[in-house]
Image (cartoon, rainbow, N blue to C red):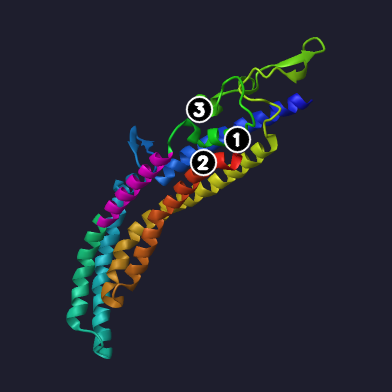
Amino acid sequence: MLIFFQELCLQLFLWLLQLIDGLMEIFSAIAGVTNVRVNGQSVNIIEYLAGNSTVGTIFWCIFILAVGLTCIFTIVGLVKNMIANNRNVSTIVGKFFLALLGTMAMLAVVFLGILIANSLLQLLARIFQIDNSNKLSNALFNACVGNWINGYNINKINVTSLSVSDIFGGYNAALFGVWPTSWKCNGMVNPNTFMYLPALISSIALGIALIIAILNLAKRVYEIIYLYFCMPVSMSTLPLDDGARFKNWREQFVTKIILAYGAVLSVNVFVLLLPLIQS
């Protein structure tokens, strides 16, 4: 019965590792680390959405609306200044032109910021990809192995492509060669030193953590496009509030752009720390 239990635990662990690899592919694509296939082309998801024709049409419609709002806010600012007389008229009019020209300048800055952020993210990911053991599923498996046998180690295999019999090898059997009695230890790892419970707990916990991270990154993509749409409107209030709303927009946009750095860095640092935790 013990051998059956060990085989079942390892099989569940391998299925969870395959799930983790799949989640990591989604994580990397949504974070902007790797490209996705769209209409036969390999594209970065955030760059693709920002440059999409439908998104562009919506942006320019909002920009036209923002031009009208800028005129209205400029008139309101002039009327308020007539009452309070605490600002210079030339300053208010200057903010009107600054809002229009600043929107065009910020459009270029937004695209440039996205391109630079994605390039740095990809560079950060490549820095941590040193060898095959840095694959998340392999690193987690290696931390739970216990003892490698027969000259095998994590650098020689891809765990998710193996079966239970490949990893544990065969077993000795009694009762007409059917009932297993002990392992032959002719596989890759020692079945008796494998950490079954930590393997299941850690893989389930890691899977849940990756799902949460993916949902947060998916929300980030939505919020970046939403802030992209809101940029002309936030600039249009410049003659009225001296850029207070634009400052709030800028802080939110920068926060959403750099959010992926923390997620990518934390996952890769976790992979690097696994061998230290094991030892």
Q: Which residue is mark 1?
A: 16
Q: Please say if 5 is above or below 129.
A: above
- Can residue 57 be seen from the camera position used here? no
Residue type beneath disc 3? Asn
| Badge 1: residue crowd in 10 Å (few <14, some 14–19, many ≥20) | many
Mark 3 and mark 1 in contact? Answer it, CB < 8 Å: no
Residue 113 belongs to magenta span: yes
Residue type beneath disc 2? Val
Residue 136: x and y in percent read 52, 37
Residue type beneath disc 1? Leu
Q: Please say if 184 is above or below 228.
A: above
Q: Which residue is mark 2?
A: 271
Which residue is more in the foreground, 122 or 186? 186
Looking at the image, is mark 3 or mark 1 earlier in the sequence? 1
Looking at the image, is mark 2 or mark 3 earlier in the sequence? 3
Q: Secondary structure at mark 3?
A: helix
Read off the magenta span: 109-128
What residue is rendered at 19% in x and 82% in y?
A: 89
Mark 2 and mark 1 in contact? Answer it, CB < 8 Å: no
Residue 110: x and y in percent read 29, 55
Q: Nearer the viewer, mark 3 or mark 1?
A: 3
Q: Which residue is mark 3?
A: 155
Residue 266 belongs to magenta span: no
Residue 74: x and y in percent read 24, 76
Query: Which quadrant of the figure contains the C terminus?
Result: top right
What residue is rendered at 22% in x and 73% in y?
A: 95
